[in-house]
Amino acid sequence: MPDFLTEGIMRTALKPAIGATMIALAAMSGAASAAPLDMLYFTQTSGFLNPAQFFGDDQDLTLAYNGPITSPPGSANTFEQLAWTSGINGATSSLTVNSYNSATSPNGDGEWNAGEWFQIDRLFQSNEVLSVPGGVPNPNPLWIADILGNFRVFSDAGFSSLLKDDLDSVTTVKYWETTNTAGCAGSPNPLGSVCDDIYTVMELSLAPISFILDGYKYEISFRLEPGATTLVCDGSPVPACLAEAGAQPGAGELFKVYAAEGFDSEIFVAAAWTATKIPEPGVLGLLGIGLMGMGLSARRRKATAA
């Protein structure tokens, strides 16, 4: 076939490929001009599930559930607080879940922008010295409980336009009320208090959640933030965690939280979000067709030249 005919055929075949590519690029450029939401809003409601497993009867300790949570927005049979009281000296220790929304988060300003970490939960421990009968060992654990969380994301400050919910997510915690004796009866004491009490997290969902809206993928990530008089050992090389034998989490444990005896302590769960543009499937298809056509044309030119 004469060269001028071959070149003409290739030019004719190449035009649709170039056209498809240009259309795809133009569509992607136009779509990119659409902006994602510049702000999201959230509510969080968490509580202890009743019943918990309790092992303190021999120590003359009693367990109480305080602050019932309405369902919804919370989970059924959940409470804000677990409290355990000594029948000998009347002292009470407790663990309380405080949940926040985007307007009440302690480290937020009510405007939850992309990349900002807002605290959604606080686990607050009031840690008192409890008297138990002499010669009776403290059980490890004293109790095991599930905390159920309900996280909802909205597009408006009035929390009326729901975008995503993550309901009944489970956090499993076991608690060790340590002995207040010299040497702490062999329990780790990395904070150096009378004897650090220990709660161990067995299960916790910190996996990101996501949803798609108007061509954007929104992903929400979660993390832990230790507060005052609290130490978290999660297997990473934190000096205080490495200095005490047994301070790091063991098999089947995610992390250990140490609370100084006789002090209040707290740990937070925080959330942040990002938005990423998703190319339209049709645009990707056009782009693929165009690039494939241009590639085939290039191969034909090489073959002709050879």
Image (spheres, helix red, strand yellow):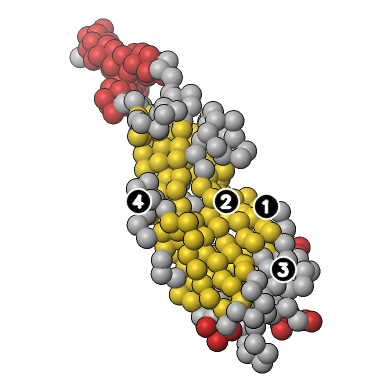
Where residue 27 sits, quadrant-wise, is top left
Foreground label between 4 and 2 = 4
Foreground label between 3 and 1 = 3
Q: Secondary structure at mark 4?
A: loop
Which residue shows up at 57% across the image and 78% down it? 61
Relative vertical location of residue 114 with respect to residue 141 in this rendering, above or below: above
Mark 4–mark 1 distance (CA, rounded to whole Å): 29 Å
Q: Nearer the viewer, residue 180 or 111?
A: 180
Q: Which amino acid type is marked by label 4?
A: Ser
Which residue shows up at 37% across the image and 54% down it? 75
Of pointers 3 and 1, the one earlier in the residue sequence: 1
Of pointers 3 and 4, the one earlier in the residue sequence: 4
Of pointers 3 and 2, the one earlier in the residue sequence: 2
Q: Percent x, y for residue 274?
A: 49, 34
Circle 3 crowding by C-alpha within 10 Å: few under 14, some 14–19, many from 20: many
Which residue shows up at 70% across the image and 72% down it? 129
Residue 71 tag number: 4
Q: Is residue 36 visible?
A: yes
Q: Quadrant of the C terminus?
A: top left
The residue carrying mark 2 is 122
Mark 4–mark 2 distance (CA, rounded to whole Å): 20 Å
Q: Secondary structure at mark 1?
A: loop
Kindly check if marks 3 and 1 are in contact, taking CB atoms under 8 A apart as contact.
no
Of pointers 4 and 1, the one earlier in the residue sequence: 4
Q: Which amino acid type is marked by label 1?
A: Gly
The residue carrying mark 1 is 227
The residue carrying mark 3 is 261
Q: Which amino acid type is marked by label 2?
A: Arg
Kindly check if marks 2 and 1 are in contact, taking CB atoms under 8 A apart as contact.
yes
Circle 2 crowding by C-alpha within 10 Å: few under 14, some 14–19, many from 20: many
Relative vertical location of residue 256 with respect to residue 300 in this rendering, above or below: below
